[in-house]
Every structure is written in C-alpha cells, then in structure tokens.
Amino acid sequence: MMKQDLYAIYSIWLREMLRFFRLKSRLFGSIASPFFFLAFLGVGFGNGASLPGIPQGLAYVSFLTPGIIGMTLLFSATFAGLSVLWDREFGFLKEIMVAPVSRIAIVLGRTAGGLTTGILQAVIILISGIFLGMAMPSIQGFLMSLVFMILIAATFIGLGLAFASKMEDMSGFSLIMNFLIFPLFFLSGALFPLDRFPGVVKDLAYLNPLTYGVDGLRYSLIGTSAFSPALDLAVLTVYCSAMLFLGAYLFENTEVK
C-alpha cells in the first residue's frame, strides 16, 4: 500500500473520531439508548432464574449485557453508511474520491473509524453492566470479547457502506436501516434465549450474523452460550468478510456527482 493511502486511512479515521467526540448529541444518544435498555430490563427482571432458558443463578443483567453490547455495535455501525451520505450531500465525498488515493483506502479509513467508535461505546456499556450487577469478566474473556466486538462492528459497517453506496437520500437510508436493524436485534437472542423462540423464528435467528456475535460475547464475558465459540467465530468471520467485500466493491464502483 502506498504512503499516501496509509495517510488517507489515518486522516479519515481521525476525522471520524473528531466528528464523534464533537457531536455531543450523537455521543449521548448512542450511549443513552443502550444504557436505558440495560438498566430498565436488567434491573426490572432481576434474577434471571425466573426466566426460562437462563442458567440457574445467573442474574438477568449478566445475560442481557452481551446482547446490549451487540445492539450498541449494530446501531453504531450504521453511522458509517450514514456518514458516507452526509459527506456526499456536502461535497466532501467528491473531494476525497478525486484525491490521488485508492478507494479501498477510503473504505479502510471509514471502517477503522467506525470500529473504534463502536468499540468505545461497547466498552462503556460493558462497564455500565458491571456497575449494574454483572460479574467482572476475566482478562482473557474481555480480550476474547474484543475480537467478537470487532467482527460484529465490521460486519455491519460493511452492510451500511453497501447500502450507502447505492443510495443518495439520507432519510431513505435511515428508514431502510431501521427496517433491517430491529429485526436483526430482536432475532439475535440479545434479550431472551434462543430456546424460547418458536421454530420458524429460530430458523431465521440462525441466519442472523448478530446471533453468533451475541452468543460469542456471552461465552467470552459470562461463560455461557448456545453454540460453541469456535462456531460463533467461524460463522461471524465469514459474514464479516462477505459484508466488507460487498461494501468495498459497491463503494469502489459508486459514482459521485
């Protein structure tokens, strides 16, 4: 990779970070919504033993925290696509597209920025879960959870970029992404065990990449899971690679007017 491509990746990453921390409303909103989910549901249901499918003696907030981390990453990743449309609207995208850098470098810069902001938010939610009663994860578990966080965020950043590359209307993009996000979230087992889903819904959950991300986070952080961690990692890696390839391909072939 050429030197100017590396500089472009760093510059776009830095721009995404500065934008994230300067937009106080976005920073607050991206953290407040998952936190309220975690606080009200986690504290409200109390002891997880009262809910079928949750291991005996496991507090519901411990079961819920990995799911809310997955939700946080899912929601934050869509901003990578929205920022593309925002930059297109105000002309910044056209400027960087005609710069002497590859489009892959632009994609990598946006992906790096989305990954960093998403993981920062996820770690804040994890700390919140610990304060609300979740057991402290081990160092090894935390490091393993970071791997799953990166894969989840990268998967949906790629999906967001793919849609943003083929759309020009920010309102339409938000509507379509919301139409996708909420079914993905509710079908992931983030709130309730997969065993509680009826047959057809369970089959749909097995096709959902977030299902394996949340399950991998649960294994990493609290030691319980519906699948083996190797299966979670393998399936999520395949989804991640496919979504990033699709997003990069469509972005590389997009036209900016």
Image: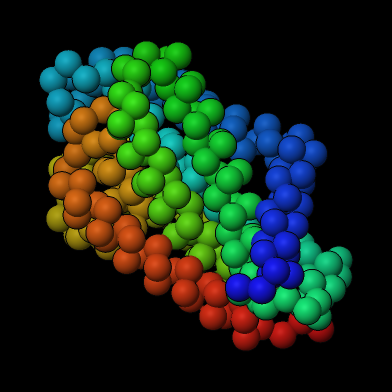
Q: Residue at x 47, y 74 (%)?
A: 245
Residue 236 visible somewhere in the drawing = yes
Left or right: where 4 falls relative to 31: right
Q: Residue at x 37, y 36 (%)?
A: 143
Q: Is residue 215 above or below residue 13?
A: above
Number of numbered markers: 0
Q: Residue at x 58, y 59 (%)?
A: 111
> Residue 237 placed where, x, y %?
33, 61
Q: Quadrant of residue 248?
A: bottom right
Visual colour scheme: rainbow
In terms of depth relative to the viewer, which is nearer, 173 or 16?
A: 16
Q: Quadrant of the N terminus?
A: bottom right
Q: Is residue 211 above or below residue 55?
A: below
> Residue 213 placed where, x, y %?
33, 48
Q: Quadrant of residue 215?
A: top left
Residue 173 visible somewhere in the drawing = no
> Residue 12 placed where, x, y %?
72, 58
